[in-house]
Amino acid sequence: MNVNEEKRILSAGPRAFALNRRRFLASLGLSAAGLTLLGTAGNWNPLSAQTASSVPVDPNHVVLLADTHCGPNLRHQIDFMRKSVAEIAAMDPHPAHVLIYGDFAFLWGKREDYVVLTELMKPLADAGIPWTACMGNHDRRDTFTEIFPEHAARSLLSDRLVFKVETPNVDFLLLDSLIQSEDPKKWITPGQVLDDQKDWLNETLKKQTKPVVVGAHHSLAETKVADILKAHSCVVGYVNGHHHTWNTKEQDGMKALVLPSNGHWGDIGLVNCRASENEAAFTLMLRDYFPGNKYPGFEPNPKREKIMAEKQGAVWRLDLG
């Protein structure tokens, strides 16, 4: 599917998918609450999950978002998030999963930020599309867990939110690089992966039998896990958010991708990953561009057209062979 096709939102919106979902579950004698989407705790495997919609699922398609920064009264962040969620929910076939690489909440990870996100993410639930978010420096682990307990319960570590998402040809490991401050009005910008999580990562990669993309909100320079990743041939790349700018330069000798922001500032967009037996291709869908001090609609941005033309449809490729 090319970029123009990916931009197209089908006429049947999220509400139509929700109705399809109810009819499908009713035909199976199931309720939404009774539908089991998870295999073993912490892992998502689209091949072992029942679909919650009559729309087919492409098990090799995963959508990546980062830096959504949503909260009450944040007009453009909410508008961009609604667009992304509606477009994902309308994809036919559905993607197998949506991955969100941190800074899910706006600034201090307030409870009301995550409450807003429950409504914004609802079309994905109605369409039966699962999602997983890792923690960024603007998130709060305890508050996220309170508002999204079913998501936090899938964590592979008890004191951090760490997840594995499986697809037929490549898996995704999402690390927790949040160092949370005791001060509710303060966030720590540098990310860090502590020694116990590094030990867990090393042992997990020893057992990995399929190509895997490791990621976190923060870069390899901050998480300092590059040496572990390079010691395991199964690791094919690293993905992070935090910098709001599509970038495919190597980090610490590793193939790496920096994701755009979904709607806060910088490159604005999402990324579609489609994997075959030999390759995973990550394609940028760029919606907009604006720097942090010039939110959309305030004044013309002369850089916008140039950046949009240069980056739209850019592809990052990983060899899985």
Image (cartoon, rainbow, N blue to C red):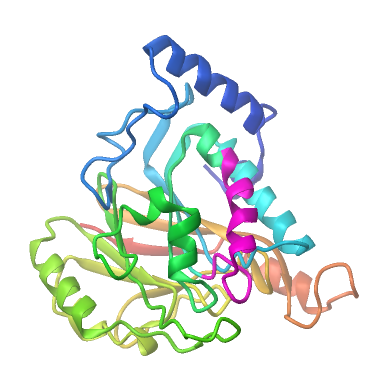
Q: Is residue 159 above or below residue 144?
A: below
How many marks are shown on the rendered structure? 0
Residue that appears at 72% across and 70% down: 289
Residue 127 appears left or right of 82: left
Residue 5 appears left or right of 219: right
Residue that appears at 63% across and 46% down: 119
Residue that appears at 45% across and 89% down: 190
**Between 97 and 153, the one nearer to me in the picture:** 153
Residue 252 appears left or right of 190: left
**Picture quarter containing residue 34?**
top left
Q: Position of residue 107 (x, y in %)?
A: 62, 76
**Between 72 and 15, the one nearer to me in the picture:** 72
Residue 100 in sight in this render: no
**Picture quarter containing residue 292?**
bottom right
Q: Position of residue 59 (x, y in %)?
A: 35, 39
Q: Position of residue 273 (x, y in %)?
A: 43, 53
**Picture quarter containing residue 215?**
bottom left
Let me know if residue 96 is in the magenta part. Answer: no
Residue that appears at 64% across and 61% down: 112
Q: Position of residue 212 (x, y in %)?
A: 25, 61
The image quadrant where one finds the C terminus is bottom left
| Residue stretch rendered in magenta on the structure | 103-123
Q: Is residue 44 above or below residue 173?
A: above
Residue 132 appears left or right of 19: left
Residue 155 in sight in this render: yes
